[in-house]
Amino acid sequence: MMNNTLKNPVGNLPQGTTIIGKWHKERYTIVRTLGYGATGYVYLTRSSKGLAALKISENSMSITSEVNVLRHFSKVQGFSLGPSLLDVDDWERQNLGGKQTFSFYVMEFLEGEPLFSFVQKRGMEWAGILILQLLTDLETLHREGWVFGDLKPDNLIVMATPPKVRLVDVGGTTQHGRAIKEFTEFFDRGYWGLGSRKAEATYDLFAVAMIMIHICYPKQFQKNGEGGEKQLGEQIDKNAWLKRYKVVLMRALAGEYSSAQEMKSGMLSVMSQRKPSASPKASVQQTVNNKAKQRTAPSSSRTARRSASTQSQPVPQKATSKGWMETAVLLSVILFAYFFYLYGQIM
């Protein structure tokens, strides 16, 4: 079922343990545990080629399945949803009962910050941008015939310069049409009574909506007797940021989006409807509009206003006001340029 901590012979390997590949003879020394799931443990390791993430399991079939997924992803041009595959091998471990063989694979170590803490530090405006990035990559994944399945914040990491969301565990990735291999209750539509556990795009999009809800409710409230859709709708209404995206969220929860691209378009539509705030930038725009009206006024009126202005305001004050206005306009241009840079990264 879900990720669990069942007793595992390759679980909780101590720091300093060296795993030597049976076939390729590469040596990987464990630095620390990165995570675990139903199919195995993931460790941060150090090798002759630097840091890498190593996933090991007693279930060789699950390792083979995940390796095939990563190999398939590597053939998709421009696709960077999951980590790069570096090595595949077996490890023979000596114990009291003799030798045991475990399968493992080594992948790129994606160093970054968890999605939740990144948004907490940078602000909620980043949540929307990162969700758009995630939907872009999911669209590619779905077109290739795969569903991520166990989509949750624990499997999301934000890499810097520029900020980019990446997924770090493909253990739950399932071919379209099959039964979901792994899931986590809060992000699973079956748990909320809002759909099956069949691998399809709508399953992942439900999880995307739940990730957005989780960002605002990190303690993960439990299901009650009201029914999933009603309860989730009420929680959305209680949060201003979520309420803004309510139409998008409710459609995703109900499985009404046919693709990640369609949900992304819905997100972009909401983001483009932001009302201008009462900021210096808005004040500068109003000033520019007023000046434009003045330029279209009759020359006699302009002369009269200019004369009155000259008599009522000292020259130094006008210069100071003009300098402030020019600085504000420049800052506005820089902000808009940065926004379009981020938008370009998303698109």
Image (cartoon, helix red, strand yellow):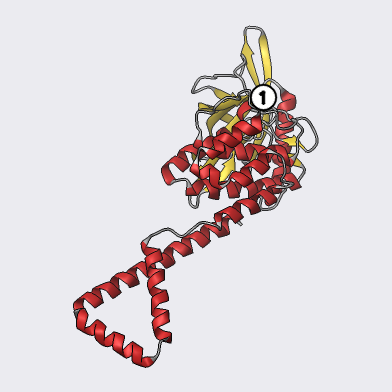
On the image, which quarter does residue 175 sit in? top right
- 292 left or right, relative to 314: right
Q: Of all residues shown, which one is farthest toward the bottom?
A: 300
Residue drawn at x 72%, y 43% as measured from the top left:
256
Image x and y of residue 68, in percent: 74, 36
Q: Residue 265 appears at what percent x and percent y? A: 65, 54
Of the pair 291 and 170, the residue shown nearer to us: 291
| 7 relative to 291, above or below | above
Q: Nearer the viewer, residue 24 or 91?
A: 91
Residue shown at 73%/32% (left/top)? 195
Compared with residue 282, is residue 212 higher up or lower down, i.e. above or below?
Answer: above
For residue 141, side relative to residue 214 (left or right): right
The quadrant of the picture occupied by the C terminus is bottom right
Residue for badge 1: 39
Whether residue 109 is visible here, answered yes or no, is: no
Regarding residue 69, the answer to whether it shows in the image is: yes
Which quadrant of the figure has residue 285?
bottom left
Give how far across and how far down residue 260 sits, in percent: 68, 47
Taking depth in this image into account, of 98 and 340 the one nearest to the observer is 340
Image position, residue 227 (x, y; %): 66, 28
Residue appearing at x 62%, y 14% in the figure: 94
Amino acid carrying label 1: it is Thr
Q: Secondary structure at mark 1?
A: loop
How would you rate the neighbour count of disc 1 (Cα within 10 Å): few for under 14, some for 14-19, many for 20 or more?
Answer: many
